Amino acid sequence: LVYAYMVTQGSDGKGLAGQQSACIYRTDTVRVRRLDPTGYFENVIEVADTKGVNKTRDVFPRPPLLCDVRVKQSSSKVFDFCCAIAHLKSTDPKLKDKGTGMRAAAASELARWVADQRSNGAEQDFFVMGDFNAEEAQQGLAPFAEAQDLRLLSIGMKEKYGTGEDGAITRFASGRLLDHIVVTQDTLALM
């Protein structure tokens, strides 16, 4: 099998320094095309540090990787979707703040991107996944649950957090590299 990978890029089309989001995929069954992030993920937020001083920080210190994915497993079975692979933070770690405002703002922006893409394009199946640095929806992930037609998956954490009307949060034993998945309702029904 031959695998390929894709990583986030800057506005100049070049790779970014430091840790970034990426995907690895099989080339015999999967085609991946990078989606343009223009108009999204550039918002900032005022965050209070431990001394009560407000600082302006980027909501996305690492931009998400946006992909259009086409999967073909046989001549008749096909599953296509779009995805955002993101790394969310509650705040800038240098501020030593334990708030969730930055994560909530990021979740809102990702939900906005999904809603806009669905209303402007043919693709209706979306995944948002990555290291969200949160254990439960109350830690800034509620905007996903509030967004129309998005569902937070719960695998292995159902017993701890329950399912509730807004869904529960996924936690994978994966070294915190992928700890949450959000899907569109149609996708959940297919699964």
Image (cartoon, helix red, strand yellow):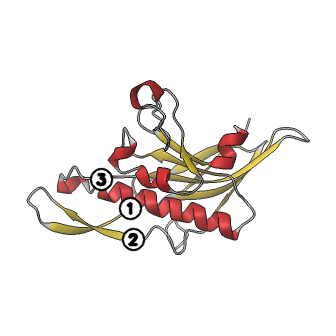
Q: Amino acid at mark 2?
A: Asn
Answer yes or no: do the residues labelled 1 and 2 have beta carbons within 8 Å? yes
Q: CA distance from mark 2 to mark 3?
A: 15 Å
20 and 64: which is toward the camera? 64
Answer yes or no: do the residues labelled 2 and 3 have beta carbons within 8 Å? no
Q: Amino acid at mark 3?
A: Thr
Give the image quarter of residue 29.
top right
The number of callouts visible is 3
Lower position in the chain sequence, tag 1 or tag 2: 2
183 and 60: which is toward the camera? 183
Q: Residue 100, which numbered label?
A: 3
Q: Amino acid at mark 1?
A: Ala
Q: CA distance from mark 3 to mark 1?
A: 9 Å
Residue underneath mark 2: 43
As helix, strand or loop, the secondary structure at mark 3 comes to loop
Answer yes or no: do the residues labelled 3 and 1 have beta carbons within 8 Å? no
Q: Is residue 53 left or right of residue 125?
A: left
Residue underneath mark 1: 105
